[in-house]
Amino acid sequence: MLRAGVVAVQGDVSEHAAAIRRAAAAHGEEVEVVEIRQSGHVPDCDVLLVPGGESTAISRLLRGEGIDEEIREHVAAGKPVLATCAGLIVASVDAKDERVETLDLIDVTVDRNAFGRQVDSFEAPLDVTGMDEPFPAVFIRAPLIDEVGEGVEVLAEWEGTPVAVRQGPVVGTSFHPELTTDSRLHDLAFFDRVEADAAD
Ligand code: GLN
């Protein structure tokens, strides 16, 4: 049984819960989804999802509830995280906005609403490392990743800009894989990895 924590202080929580259920079912894996609004639950989770939404609100609430430290410990223990859009902003090392207290999980700096300034939302087929067919990526007021540290693997780019990155057990996307029925990003973040670990 996989215990998947969806950070539920703000954002598209139900979409993430549905997406991880779908992805787990495709792997024949039973999953229990835990919505995380308070401290004390993250330590019980095998994997975590940090949703899209409003990064200033998410970071403030994580801090206020003491969940931020638990997420850092989860990652330090090598357990996987998928952070999408506002989640990626929160997971970065610098969002260039003092209202966002970053978790410093992925060594990237982001510009919070950069894509959104050009066009509010769009869908684009993306070539993602390890995928044979393009991934249908939904961007909504998406952050721009503008600096990538050495330990960070870029998994996908859109028009020359990184939009999916991985550092250790953490995968971050500027777009919203939870808004499609395509589970390949979840496979990449969670299941392929679990299977790879099991094969070791
Ligand atoms: N730009 C938003 C923020 O700063 C994120 C948008 C999203 O998650 N769709 O939080």
Image: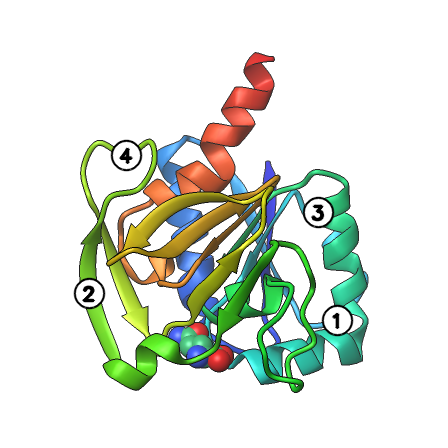
Q: Say which residue label 4 marks.
A: 131
Q: Earlier in the sequence, mark 2 or mark 3?
A: 3
Q: Is residue 84 visible?
A: no
Q: Are marks 4 and 2 in contact (CB under 8 Å)?
A: no
Residue 36, located in which quarter of the rendered image? Answer: bottom right
The residue lying toward the viewer, choosing from 123 and 97, is 97
> What is the number of the mark on residue 38?
1
Determine the CA span between mark 4 and mark 2.
18 Å
Q: Residue furthest top?
A: 200
Query: Disc 1 vs disc 4: which is toward the camera?
Result: 4
Q: Earlier in the sequence, mark 1 or mark 4?
A: 1
Residue 134 image point, x, y percent: 19, 44
Q: Secondary structure at mark 1?
A: loop
Residue 127 image point, x, y percent: 24, 43
Up-down: is 107 above or below 123? above
Q: Are marks 1 and 2 in contact (CB under 8 Å)?
A: no
Q: Is residue 142 visible?
A: yes
Q: Amino acid at mark 3?
A: Val
The residue lying toward the viewer, choosing from 72 and 19, is 72
**Residue located 81% across and 61% down the image:** 40
Q: Earlier in the sequence, mark 1 or mark 2?
A: 1
Q: Secondary structure at mark 2?
A: strand
Residue 83 image point, x, y percent: 52, 58
Q: Say which residue label 2 marks.
A: 123
